[in-house]
Image (cartoon, grey):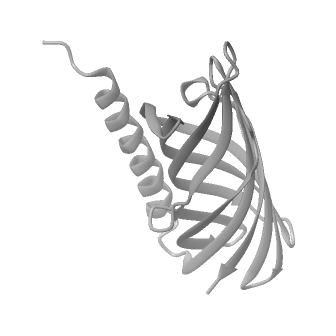
Amino acid sequence: MKPNKKLVMKILSRLLAIFIALTYCITAAAAEFRPMISGSFYYAKINEPGIRLENKIDPSFSIGIFAKKERFITSLTTNRLTTFVSNKNASSEKTGAPMISKSKAQSDVLSIGYTFNKFAPSLLISDVRLNKKLEYQGQIISNKTKNAILTGISGTYFLDKHFSVSAFYILPNQKVNLEGAVGTSINLIF
């Protein structure tokens, strides 16, 4: 009996995220932990085979935990409680038939960085579950769910102890047909 490749990848990606989070948290036991919320806008360039897809700016809202120990910072956030559905116009590359693409991305993001005064560059690791539906004349013609580990970088500027702004870039990932994503966020740390 062959193991289900998707299930194995999903389990491995979750274990990797948990391992990284636990490793960092154990070494940062004396760190200052605070809750945080984050609102962002992002633009993701998606290349769906056989479909012309409108790419647009979408909102996202996350909650999580922020930790700081000396100059090292980390955050662990999720948008699972506040996931938005992104509706985009689409069309078939062959026939030009108009369609609607509906996608919902749930993500858990681990950010690890180092502060230089008020600026902090960081590495991002995100465990993403993406559900995509394609509709033609009110009928669902495709419904797919994909899981992937995305990586990227961010730069954060701390206006004060409780408020920061960030810009980020997510690297391309073939598994979810992502050519790259950019965005900005406003972060409130309690």
Query: Which residue is more in the foreground, 182 or 162?
Result: 182
Q: Quadrant of residue 59?
A: bottom right
- Left or right: residue 9 versus residue 122 is left
Please tell me which residue is depicted at 62% across the width and 18% down the height of the picture. Answer: 49
Please tell me which residue is depicted at 51% across the width and 61% down the height of the picture. Answer: 83
Relative vertical location of residue 45 with respect to residue 38 in this rendering, above or below: above
Q: Quadrant of residue 55?
A: top right
Instruction: From the top left corner, tell me how far across and down residue 156 is, in percent.
Output: 80, 64
Q: Is residue 47 visible from the viewing direction of this image? A: no
User: Which residue extends farthest left?
Assistant: 1
Instruction: From the top left corner, tell me how far across and down residue 164 is, in percent.
Output: 78, 75
Query: Which residue is more in the foreground, 185 or 151?
Result: 185
- Left or right: residue 40 versus residue 4 is right
Total numbered badges shown on the rendered structure = 0
Query: Which residue is more in the foreground, 34 or 24?
Result: 34
User: Which residue extends farthest front?
Assistant: 137
Please tell me which residue is depicted at 21% across the width and 19% down the height of the picture. Answer: 3
Q: Quadrant of the N terminus?
A: top left
Q: Is residue 88 visible from the viewing direction of this image? A: yes
Instruction: From the top left corner, tell me how far across and down residue 143 is, in percent.
Output: 42, 34
Q: Quadrant of residue 160?
A: bottom right
Relative vertical location of residue 131 with respect to residue 187 in this rendering, above or below: above
Please tell me which residue is depicted at 58% across the width and 39% down the height of the picture. Answer: 101
- Left or right: residue 185 versus residue 64 is right
Q: Quadrant of the C terminus?
A: bottom right
